[in-house]
Image: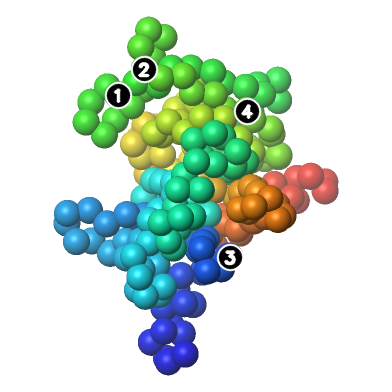
C-alpha cells in the first residue's frame, strides 16, 4: 500500500471491511453522499479507497457522526437494503440533550411531515409515523446523555423526537437555534446478520473528540 493509499485509509476511520461491505466512523461536518456542488463526500472517499463505485446503505446528516455503511457490489447492495427495509438492522444512537431527561420517557411516537424544503416537523395530522425508544445514560449540570433506538428511519427523526420530549439536542442549529457546540448526535452501534446467516455482526464507534469532556462529566457524576 502506497503512502497516499495509507493516508486515505487512515482518514476514513474504518470500523469494518470485507469484500462486500465497508463501515466507516463518520466525522461530523462531511456529507455522506456527493451533491451537485462537487463537495467532498464520504462516498467519494470510500470509492477512492475501494477502487470502485460504492453505495451508501443509509444516510447520516452532515452534522451527525458515527457508523455509516457502504455496499461494495450490487448483490450485497440489495441484501443490506432489504435488511433496512425489513427493520432487521438494530441501530443505536447517543445524544447529549439540554435538561435532565425524565427517565419515564422511554418512547416517542409521532408523525413527521415536511414543512418546507429540507425542513421537517412533528405533525399530529399528516406525515409518516416515526417511533423511537430512549434510555437515559447519565445527567449532570442541566444536561443528559441518552441512548436512542430509532424503530423507523424518518429524516431528522431523533432531533425532532428529542425536541418533542422537551430536551433539544445540544448543537442543533436547525431546530433549536443552538450554535453553542457541534451537534452532539452520534450513530453509536449497528447489529445485523451477515448474508447466509453465517453470523451476526455487531459494530460500535467511538464519538468524536468533542464528546470527551461531556462524557467525562457524566461519568464523574455517576461515581460521586
Do the residues under discs 1 and 2 have CB atoms within 8 angstroms?
yes
State the SS at label 4. strand
The answer to whether residue 165 of the structure is visible from this angle is no
Instruction: Tell me the residue at 54%/24% (across/down).
Output: 131
Observer-nearest residue: 208 or 22? 22
Q: Name the residue under label 1.
A: 114
Are there few (<14), some (14-19), or many (20+) residues within 10 Å of tag 2?
Answer: some
Observer-nearest residue: 135 or 215? 135
Using the rendered view, name the quadrant where residue 145 is placed: top right
Q: How far apart are marks 3 and 1 (CA)?
A: 34 Å
- Badge nearest the viewer, 4 or 2: 2
Instruction: Tell me the residue at 41%/46% (across/down).
Output: 59
Q: How far apart are marks 3 and 4 (CA)?
A: 26 Å
Are there few (<14), some (14-19), or many (20+) residues within 10 Å of tag 1?
Answer: some
Q: How far apart are marks 4 and 2 (CA)?
A: 19 Å
The answer to whether residue 33 of the structure is visible from this angle is yes
Mark positioned earlier in the residue sequence (3 or 1): 3
Q: Name the residue under label 4.
A: 133
State the SS at label 3. strand
Q: Mark 2 points at which residue?
A: 127
Q: Distance between the residues labelled 2 and 3?
A: 35 Å
Observer-nearest residue: 208 or 142? 208
Mark positioned earlier in the residue sequence (4 or 2): 2
Instruction: Tell me the residue at 17%/54% (across/down).
Output: 36
Amino acid at each position: 500500500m502506497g503512502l497516499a493509499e495509507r493516508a486515505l485509509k487512515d482518514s476514513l476511520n474504518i470500523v469494518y471491511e470485507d469484500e462486500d461491505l465497508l463501515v466507516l466512523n463518520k466525522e461530523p461536518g462531511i456529507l455522506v453522499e456527493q451533491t451537485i456542488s462537487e463537495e467532498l463526500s464520504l462516498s467519494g472517499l470510500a470509492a477512492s479507497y475501494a477502487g470502485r463505485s460504492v453505495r451508501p446503505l443509509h444516510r447520516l446528516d452532515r452534522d451527525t457522526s458515527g457508523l455509516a455503511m457502504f455496499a461494495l457490489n450490487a448483490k450485497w447492495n440489495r441484501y443490506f437494503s432489504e435488511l433496512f427495509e425489513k427493520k432487521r438492522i438494530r441501530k443505536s444512537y447517543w445524544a447529549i440533550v439540554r435538561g435532565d431527561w425524565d427517565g419515564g420517557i422511554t418512547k416517542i411516537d409521532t408523525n413527521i411531515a415536511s414543512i418546507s424544503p429540507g425542513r421537517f416537523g412533528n405533525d399530529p395530522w399528516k406525515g409518516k409515523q416515526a417511533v423511537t425508544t430512549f434510555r437515559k445514560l447519565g445527567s449532570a449540570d442541566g444536561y443528559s446523555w441518552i441512548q436512542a433506538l430509532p424503530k423507523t428511519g424518518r429524516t431528522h427523526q431523533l432531533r425532532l423526537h428529542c425536541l418533542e420530549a422537551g430536551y433539544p439536542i445540544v448543537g442543533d442549529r436547525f431546530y433549536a437555534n443552538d450554535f453553542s457546540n457541534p451537534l452532539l448526535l452520534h450513530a453509536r452501534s449497528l447489529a445485523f446478520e451477515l448474508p447466509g446467516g453465517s453470523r451476526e455482526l455487531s459494530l460500535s464507534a467511538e464519538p468524536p473528540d468533542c464528546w470527551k469532556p461531556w462524557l467525562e462529566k457524566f461519568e464523574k457524576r455517576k461515581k460521586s
